[in-house]
Structure formats: structure tokens, C-alpha cells
Image (cartoon, grey):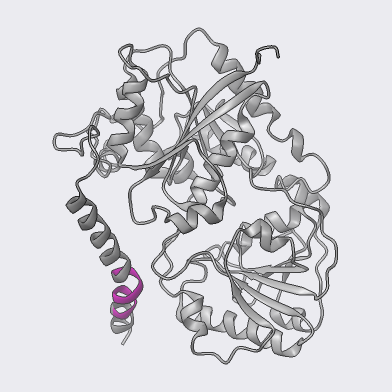
């Protein structure tokens, strides 16, 4: 058989949570030029939300290698791979699937690690889902990557406005779509299944979360012919992209649940395979559902508020309350709104990543690439940037600070035990101690 003419593309994805790993790994596959075979290496940033083995299995994205690292360990690995003395091939693309501060730190760290080299990987970053808060802050923390991916036409326009408004180069903004959209178009099923997609931090009060749980249970009692599912993101003790202080499964322990009501975990796509009505406050699952043309409701019971994120869905045709759902309401989404949000429910999804592929192919073929050039520098943000870098053990120039974790050996068994214990104590503090302190403060 003739030898393959396809190019092997080496991609590294650095992620700090299960959701961002899913976004980063799927994005890597979507943006790779079509004539490429991919070797995908995953790096999981050590922290409070480092995914567990169960969470990684639920995401369902496979990598050729996967290991947990600190930020400094990652930077040293990237610098070593791109040195002339390395036995390992350099990466072609690095995807930073991190919170904004993490992206900014890694951009400065990579600039320092790569020094004056003109041959370096293409650096890509973006957002996991809907961008409804801290738009300017999050965007400027991501500035400096070769591609800043926008999940919709609306986001692309907003991103460029922010960059141009502060005098920063906006050419990195590249319109794509959410990488995890897919699945078969909706067909009505039997029994009719209602799914509530829970979110770790929205809403954040016990009162509001208890209210939503009670209304979901009430809906199950009012419609015994329906199957009602509460789709959970994580099990107690696990963390996701956002902190969950009041897991629904703990609140549900105090409720007499009807027989047609169940708590479910698992891949969201598999749950949507059996969904007839998706209900949420503001989860990105709503966009996955709309992509499949599944009837989708964004709840208004707690108001339409920026803190809830459901204000993003104004104009979607999906806003409704539990009273309306109990009465049998099914929403009709606005086609123009859906198209502008990058949901691509009507056939354009396969071409949504073409612009990113073309841009990356051009950068990969370039004889040289300029150093990474973030907007934030010690000159433009002297009171902000040093703190962001220090949290990742980096100095103002992006180089590791003295005493930063070494990358040349695995942690000892004792150190691993201490890390697990510390992480467990942190999670206990977040989920048990902090809520008690807040309640005491309200007395």
C-alpha cells in the first residue's frame, strides 16, 4: 500500500477542569487542517478542579497521553520540546483551555520559555460556552494567543470591539462554533422525557436551588406519564469549572421523589439522545439542545438577570417559567437568534471551523512566527499582571520564580498523599464550612 501523505500534527491541550478539557480536546480535533493526522497530548493543570478519572471517562474524549502538571511543569515541558537538544518532536499547536488568568500566565510563560525562537507552536485559546460576564476582563486576559476562538458571529463581533477599543490587535479573533455540538436531530420519543440541566453555581443560594428542585419534582407529579430527569454535572467531592457548594443530590435527599423522577449523570450528548424537553437556567446544554432542534426552555422563575446568565437568551424565544411548562407550553426558538449564536441548527455546522483551519494552516506553513504579544505587559498593567503571573509561580518576565515546582521528576508518594489530602480539605471547606460561615454572617 502507498505511504500516507497525511501530515502528523502534534497538539498539546492544557486544561484546568473537565469541561475545559472537553472543549480543548474537541477543539483540537475540529481546527486541525483536514489533511492531518493528530497526536493529542493532554496536560491537566493541577488545582481544585483537576478532573477525576470518572469525569474524564464521562467526557469521552481520548488522548494519546494524559498527565497532571503544574503551570511551571507545563512551561518547562514546552520549552524543552522546542529546544534543539530535545529528543521529542516539537508541538505544532498548543491549546490553552483555561480560565482567563491561567491563559494570560501561560502566554507570558510560553513567550519566556521559547525566547527568541522563530519556529514555535501556534497557540489557540477561547471560551467553553456562552460569554455572559466579565467580557472585557476575560478577553484581555486571552489576548496574545495566535487565535482567540469565538463561538458565534455575535461573540466574534463583541471580541473585536473590545480589542479594537483598547488599541489591541484584533486579528486573532476567529469565528467558529462550539466544538461539542452534534448528535441526531430531534425525534419525539416515548415516554416523553423532560431533562433539567443543573449548573454548579447558578443559582448559588440554597433557597433558589431548593425552589428549582421542588418545581422539577412538582412537574413530575403533575405529569406522571412523563419521565423527569435531573442531569447532574458532578458527584459530591468532585469539582467542575465552577464551585458547587450545594449539590442537588444532597438537597434531593430531603425530598420524597416520585417514581418517574431520577437523578442521572453521564455524557450530555447521550442524555440529549432521549430528551423531549430540555430545561435549564442558563447552561450551555441549551445550545447543544437547540442545535439538535430539541424543544428548549430557559427559566425565568428567578428573573432574567445577568447574575444568572439567562439574559444571554433574550430574543431566543426560549424564555419561559415552570408554571407555563406545567401547563404544557413548548417554546419555538427564533431562527435568526439561533443562527447568530453559532448553534448552526440548519446545516452550516460542518463549515463552521473552516476559517480556523485555514488560518492555522497558514501559520503552520510560515517560515517564522513572531513572539507571543499579549496586551497586558508590566508597562500596560503594572498593578494587575504581576499578581496573575505570581499565582502561577512566574515572575514579571514570565520566567519561573525561584523555588517553583520542578518538572524533572514525579511527586513522591508522600507528596501525592499530601496533595490529595489538601485538595480534599479545600473541597470540604468550600462545600461544608464556607456555607456555614456565610449563614452565620447573615444572622
From the top left corner, tell me how far across and down residue 363 is, in percent: 55, 17
Residues shaded magenta:
429-436
Residue located at (64% from left, 47% from top): 180
Picture quarter with the C terminus: bottom left
Q: Nearer the viewer, residue 149 or 45?
A: 45
Where residue 188 appears, x then y in whole percent?
Answer: 85, 67
In percent of the image, x 28 and y 64: which residue is there?
A: 426
Residue 360 sits in which quadrant?
Answer: top right
> Seen in the image, is 210 located left or right of residue 189?
left
Residue 160 seen in this snapshot = no
Q: Is residue 383 left or right of residue 51?
A: left
- Asked if residue 21 is positioned above or below residue 278 in the image, the reply reads above
- Residue depicted at 36% across the width and 13% down the height: 117
The N terminus sits in image quarter: top right
- x, y (%) of residue 406? 20, 35
| Relative vertical location of residue 83 with respect to residue 170 in this rendering, above or below | above
Vertical relation: 425 (above or below) 90:
below
Image location (x, y in percent) of residue 387: 26, 43
**Residue placed farthest to the left in the image?**
403
Near-viewer residue (321 or 47)? 47
The answer to whether 230 is drawn above or below residue 130 in the figure is below
- Which of the 4 image quadrants contains residue 137? top left
Q: In terms of secondary structure, what is the magenta stretch mainly?
A: helix
Answer whether residue 177 is magenta in the image: no
Along the line of sight, the residue nearer the viewer: 315 or 8: 8
Does the magenta segment cover residue 432?
Answer: yes
Amino acid at each position: 500500500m502507498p505511504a500516507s501523505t497525511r501530515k502528523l500534527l502534534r497538539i498539546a491541550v492544557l486544561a484546568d477542569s473537565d469541561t475545559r478539557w472537553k472543549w480543548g480536546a474537541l477543539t483540537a480535533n475540529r481546527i486541525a487542517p483536514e489533511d492531518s493526522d493528530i497526536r493529542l497530548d493532554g496536560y491537566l493543570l493541577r488545582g481544585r478542579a483537576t478532573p477525576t478519572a470518572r469525569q474524564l471517562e464521562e467526557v469521552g474524549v481520548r488522548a494519546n497521553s494524559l498527565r497532571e502538571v503544574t503551570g511551571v511543569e507545563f512551561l518547562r515541558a514546552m520549552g524543552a520540546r522546542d529546544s534543539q537538544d530535545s529528543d521529542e518532536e516539537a508541538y505544532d499547536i498548543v491549546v490553552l483551555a483555561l480560565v482567563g488568568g491561567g491563559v494570560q500566565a501561560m502566554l507570558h510563560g510560553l513567550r519566556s520559555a521559547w525566547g527568541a525562537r522563530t519556529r514555535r507552536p501556534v497557540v489557540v485559546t477561547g471560551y467553553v460556552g456562552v460569554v455572559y460576564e466579565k467580557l472585557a476582563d476575560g478577553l484581555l486576559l486571552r489576548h496574545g494567543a495566535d487565535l482567540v476562538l469565538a463561538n458565534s458571529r455575535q461573540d466574534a463581533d463583541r471580541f473585536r470591539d473590545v480589542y479594537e477599543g483598547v488599541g489591541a490587535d484584533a486579528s486573532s479573533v476567529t469565528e467558529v462554533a462550539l466544538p461539542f455540538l452534534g448528535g441526531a436531530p430531534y425525534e419525539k420519543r416515548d415516554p416523553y422525557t423532560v431533562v433539567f440541566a443543573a449548573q454548579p453555581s447558578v443559582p448559588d443560594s440554597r433557597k433558589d436551588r431548593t425552589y428549582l428542585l421542588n418545581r422539577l419534582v412538582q412537574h413530575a407529579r403533575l405529569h406522571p406519564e412523563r419521565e423527569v430527569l435531573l442531569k447532574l454535572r458532578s458527584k459530591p467531592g468532585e469539582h467542575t469549572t465552577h464551585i458547587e457548594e450545594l449539590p442537588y443530590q444532597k438537597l434531593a435527599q430531603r425530598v420524597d421523589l416520585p417514581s418517574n423522577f431520577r437523578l442521572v449523570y453521564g455524557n450530555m450528548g447521550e442524555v440529549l439522545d432521549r430528551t423531549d424537553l430540555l430545561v435549564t437556567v442558563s447552561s450551555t446544554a441549551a445550545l447543544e439542545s437547540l442545535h439538535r432542534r430539541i424543544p428548549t426552555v430557559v427559566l425565568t422563575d428567578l428573573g432574567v438577570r445577568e447574575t444568572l446568565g439567562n439574559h444571554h437568551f433574550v430574543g431566543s424565544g426560549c424564555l419561559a417559567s415552570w408554571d407555563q411548562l406545567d401547563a404544557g407550553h413548548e417554546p419555538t426558538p427564533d431562527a435568526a437568534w439561533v443562527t447568530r449564536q453559532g448553534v448552526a441548527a440548519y446545516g452550516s455546522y460542518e463549515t463552521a471551523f473552516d476559517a480556523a483551519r485555514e488560518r492555522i494552516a497558514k501559520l503552520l506553513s510560515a517560515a517564522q512566527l513572531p513572539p507571543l504579544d499579549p496586551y497586558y505587559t508590566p508597562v500596560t498593567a503594572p498593578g494587575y499582571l504581576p499578581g496573575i503571573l505570581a499565582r502561577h509561580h512566574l515572575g514579571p518576565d514570565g520566567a519561573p520564580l525561584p523555588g517553583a515546582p520542578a518538572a524533572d521528576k514525579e511527586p513522591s508518594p508522600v507528596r501525592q498523599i499530601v496533595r490529595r489530602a489538601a485538595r480534599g480539605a479545600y473541597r470540604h471547606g468550600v462545600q461544608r464550612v464556607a456555607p456555614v460561615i456565610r449563614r452565620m454572617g447573615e444572622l
